[in-house]
Image: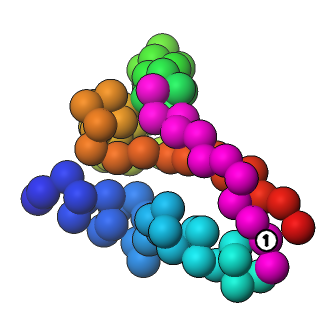
């Protein structure tokens, strides 16, 4: 299964990531002005790495609570997404809006 299909099927079914222009359009429609868009791409890659390391450090506990299948699913999600963020294929942005 392609990684994007995996994310949409296994992690965020029905999920959707809006583009910057979509967020700007909705902000403007709601009466806001976008004054800043800040990429958090590399910060989020580091966050995902931290979460993956914490999950890996608690592997046995996580498997006992859920299952090895669920553990593997989330390790794939965390490490795969971190790679996508690091390589510039996806991003998460922070918007500053003014009324």
- Residue furthest out toward the right: 99
Residue ID at (23%, 58%): 4
Q: Decide if residue 76 is in sight here.
A: no
Left or right of 41 on screen, residue 79? left
- Residue furthest out toward the left: 1
The span shown in magenta is 31-42
Tell me the quadrant of the picture where the C terminus can be found: bottom right
Residue 78's spot in the image, x, y percent? Answer: 39, 36
Q: Is residue 38 magenta?
A: yes
Is 47 in front, or is 24? Answer: 24
Residue ID at (67%, 47%): 36
Residue ID at (46%, 35%): 41
Tell me the quadrant of the picture where the N terminus can be found: bottom left
Left or right of 95 on screen, residue 6? left
Residue 40's spot in the image, x, y percent? Answer: 54, 35
Residue ID at (35%, 47%): 90
Q: Is residue 76 magenta?
A: no
Which residue is tagged 1? 32
Residue 68's spot in the image, x, y percent? Answer: 34, 39
Q: Quick check: 6 above or below 32?
A: above
Left or right of 98 on screen, residue 78? left
Element class at badge 1: loop
Q: Quick check: 68 above or below 26?
A: above
């Amino acid at each position: 299964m392609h990684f994007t299909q995996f994310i949409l099927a296994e992690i965020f079914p029905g999920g959707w990531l809006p583009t910057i222009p979509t967020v700007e359009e909705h902000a403007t429609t709601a009466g806001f002005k976008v004054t800043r868009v800040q990429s958090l791409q590399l910060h989020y890659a580091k966050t995902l790495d931290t979460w993956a390391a914490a999950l890996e450090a608690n592997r046995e506990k996580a498997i006992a609570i859920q299952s090895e299948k669920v553990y593997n699913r989330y390790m794939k999600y965390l490490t795969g997404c971190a790679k996508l963020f690091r390589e510039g294929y996806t991003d998460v942005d922070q918007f500053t809006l003014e009324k």
